[in-house]
Image: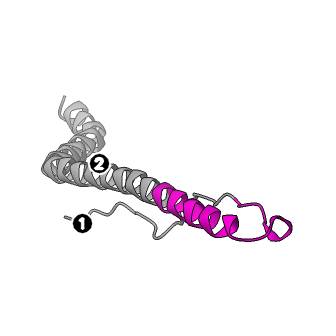
C-alpha cells in the first residue's frame, strides 16, 4: 500500500506541476486583459483617425485639382488654338508615411 501511494504521488507530480503552470498563465492573461483592451481601443482609434485623414486629404486634393484645372482653362483660353495643350488629370494616390505597429509598451 505504501509503495502504491508513492507511485501514485510520483505519477501525479507532473500533472500537479502542469496545473500550477496553467494557473499562473491564467493569472498572467487576466492581468494583461485590461492592457490588451486599452491597446485595442488605441489601435482602433488610430485606424479611424488615419481613415478619416485619408478621406480629408483626397477631398482636399480633388478640390485643389479642380482649382488647378479651372486656372489652366482660363490661361488656355488666352492662347492661340494651335498652342493649347490638353489638361492632364492628376493622380490621387495617398503616399505611405509610416508603418503602424502594435506594441505592449504603447499607451
Image location of residue 16, percent across then percent down: 22, 41
**79 or 25, nearer to the observer:** 79
- Look at the picture and state if 10 lies above or below 76: above
> Is residue 7 left or right of 50 when viewed as pictured?
left
Front-most of residues 50 and 57: 57
Compute the Cα span from label 1 to label 2: 13 Å
Q: Quadrant of residue 20?
A: top left
* Label number found at residue 44: 2
* Quadrant the C terminus occupies: bottom left
Q: In terms of secondary structure, what is the magenta stretch mainly?
A: helix
Residue 77 horizontal side relative to residue 16, left or right: right
**Point 23% across, 54% down: residue:** 42
Split into 4 quadrants, where in the image is the N terminus?
top left
| Residue 18: x %, y % from top left | 27, 43
Asked whether, in this view, residue 91 is left or right of residue 94, the answer is right
In the rendered image of this protein, does residue 76 appear above or below residue 46?
A: below
- Label 1's element? loop
Residue extending farthest to the right is: 82
Please state which of residues 9 and 81 is positioned toward the viewer in this rendering: 81
Give the SS element for disc 2.
helix
Task: Pick whichever of labels 1 and 2 is earlier in the sequence.
Answer: 2
| Residue 11's disc number | none
Q: Which residue is mark 1?
A: 106
Residue 53 is one of the magenta-drawn residues? no
The magenta region covers 62-88
Report crowding for label 2: few under 14, some 14 to 19, many 20 or more residues within 10 A (C-alpha): few
Q: Residue at x 62, y 66 (%)?
A: 72
> Is residue 66 magenta-colored?
yes
The number of numbered badges drawn on the structure is 2
Coordinates of residue 65 in the picture (x, y in percent): 54, 60
Q: Is residue 36 above or below residue 101?
A: above
Q: Residue 90, located in which quarter of the rendered image?
A: bottom right
Amino acid at each position: 500500500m505504501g509503495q502504491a501511494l508513492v507511485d501514485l504521488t510520483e505519477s501525479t507530480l507532473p500533472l500537479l506541476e502542469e496545473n500550477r503552470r496553467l494557473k499562473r498563465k491564467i493569472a498572467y492573461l487576466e492581468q494583461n486583459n485590461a492592457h490588451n483592451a486599452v491597446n485595442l481601443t488605441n489601435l482602433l482609434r488610430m485606424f479611424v483617425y488615419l481613415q478619416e485623414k485619408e478621406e480629408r486629404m483626397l477631398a482636399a486634393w480633388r478640390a485643389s485639382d479642380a482649382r488647378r484645372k479651372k486656372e489652366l482653362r482660363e490661361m488656355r483660353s488666352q492662347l492661340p488654338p494651335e498652342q493649347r495643350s490638353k489638361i492632364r488629370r492628376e493622380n490621387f494616390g495617398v503616399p505611405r508615411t509610416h508603418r503602424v505597429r502594435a506594441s505592449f509598451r504603447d499607451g
